[in-house]
Amino acid sequence: MSAIPVAAPALISHVRAQIETGEDPLGVAFCSLRSPVERRPEGATYTPLSIVKPMLAWAKRAGRPDRVVDPGAGSGRFLVNAGRCFPAARLVAVEVDPLAAVLARAHLAAAGLGSRSQVLVADYRCADLRDFVGSTLFIGNPPYVRHHLVGQRWKDWLTKVAAARGLPASQLSGLHVYFFLATLEHANPGDYGVYVTAAEWLDVNYGALVRKLFVGGLGGTALHLIEPTAVAFPDAITTAAITCFHVGAQPKSVRVRRVAALTELGALDAGRSIRRERLATADRWTPLTRGARAIPDGCVELGEVCRVRRGQVTGANAFWIAGDHSGDLPQGVLFPTVTRARELYRAGRCLVDASRLHCVIDLPEDLDALEQEDRHKIEILLRKARAAGVHRGYIARHRKAWWSVGLHEPAPILATYMARRPPGFVRNLSDARHINIAHGIYPREPMSDRALAALADYLAAHTSVADGRTYAGGLTKFEPREMERLLVPSPEFLV
Ligand SMILES: C[S@@+](CC[C@H](N)C(=O)[O-])C[C@H]1O[C@@H](n2cnc3c(N)ncnc32)[C@H](O)[C@@H]1O
């Protein structure tokens, strides 16, 4: 007789006892049987209980699901703990690796959850999860696998499924991006979820799809960044992100925070609120989570109240700012525009009269929309532009129609952003446009004239060069996102 059957009963009761106390000895065995290098192609990095538990604590406070789905379940850590939290819920594990799936089955059975569990050995992206009536909690750790290991068939799937939602997808996306999209495909409004992933998608180009899903259909409500020092995953030193969502929700604001230690996670209910629109307009999200600072009572960051937008780049100011060279043009294509910072400094508190400003020539993309007589004048202008090579400039080549500058709407407040002095903030009462020598400050919700004037005055009086970024030579610059971090009174104190 071999030694295994003799050792087995004791070993089995030992493993069962460990499972009963909430440990995952089968998952630990899996990770010691397969080295990190062997596990990497499937993205099999198992989640420590110090992350699983806070995620479940949040899920428990946020709802009572009829079903829990764990995409890429591994040995079933999330699912077994979910089964204990939600005693009536159906438990569904989806796992592509048959060995891990067997362990998940054993884990669920030993924990006494077998009768309400199902382990699907399937690819999560095409798993059949639709046939269910009731609410679902999606919880887990989608696999992190780089795009090189994702087959072309799946890349085509990503492009097609994202396009059906009107979203672009990058072929460089990692597998976790597919899981976010598949979740939305599987989910119904009212379902909710919480995933832990590497935080990369917050900032990289391919992550744009997840960012759009988060502020769109997925209904992201909170983001918790775990600093690398907290070592979220023993196999990988990386910043991790916990993403909480309520499918179909469009919350006004989203909670964001960073934690330096896993013990700080709590029930994932802390964090500062930032408006969802702010995330929607930012290309990189990590800066928005940084430097969470104490905000005095009665104050908010400017970005909570207003969007700051750099003025349009013309690509050839010498041509598109009207002058003698442009001849006689129809009024409809000439827009009084702030084209120099000094025009704002000179205006003082309010820009009332735009008649002293230069005009920018802004032609429609569709020139057929012009009257016949105007069209003739514009043709003459465009011939001059071509002769001067304006159509070959970088900006001209990269816009929809090379001749159409596309000025932004008039901003109610205009600001200078690069000078050896604090920025000027000017209430724009003249509907002047602005090019990229100024930022436009646009309220996110309608604001009264009084409130706008009070906001501009407050910014002018309280913004110093120390708030911006100073370059050699003393030039201080405020990028739009930096300007959005200026503290201003809450809107109710501005009226
Ligand atoms: C990061 S691990 C998470 C395991 C477990 N949920 C945990 O957190 O401990 C990701 C799991 O997804 C599985 N996986 C990878 N690709 C998959 C796919 N296309 N469909 C379903 N599961 C997949 C891997 O085998 C691995 O077990």
Image (spheres, rainbow, N blue to C red):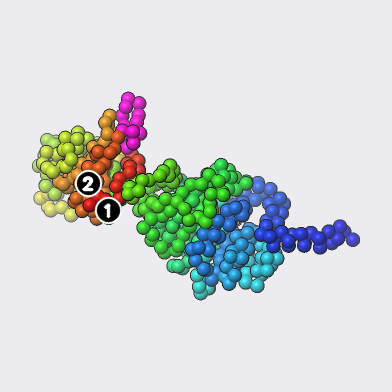
In the visual, does 228 lie left or right of 389?
Answer: right
The amino acid pointed to by label 2 is Ala
| Vertical comparison of 386 with 66: above or below | above
Q: Is residue 55 visible?
A: yes
Numbered mark located on residue 454 in the image: 2
Q: Looking at the rendering, which quadrant does residue 393 occupy?
A: top left
Task: Look at label 1 and name its amino acid.
Answer: Glu
Quadrant where the N terminus is found in the figure: bottom right
Q: Is residue 488 magenta?
A: no
Q: Is mark 1 within 8 Å of ligand 1?
A: no
Residue depicted at x 68% and y 48%: 35
Q: How many marks?
A: 2
- Report the front residue among 15 and 369: 15
Quick one: SS at disc 1?
Answer: helix
Label 2: few (<14), some (14–19) or many (≥20) C-alpha neighbours in 10 Å: some
- Magenta region, residue range: 465-478
- Beta carbon at label 2 within 8 Å of ligand 1: no
Q: Is residue 365 left or right of residue 78?
A: left
Look at the picture and state if 409 lies above or below 69: above
Residue placed under numbered mark 1 in the picture: 492
Where residue 191 sits: x, y (%)? 48, 66
Category of crowding for the residue at label 1, using alpha-carbon neighbours closer than 10 angstroms: few (below 14), some (14–19), many (at least 20): few
Name which residue lies at 15% across and 52% down.
370
Q: Nearer the viewer, residue 277 or 39?
A: 277
Image coordinates of residue 71 in percent, x first then y, are 57, 61
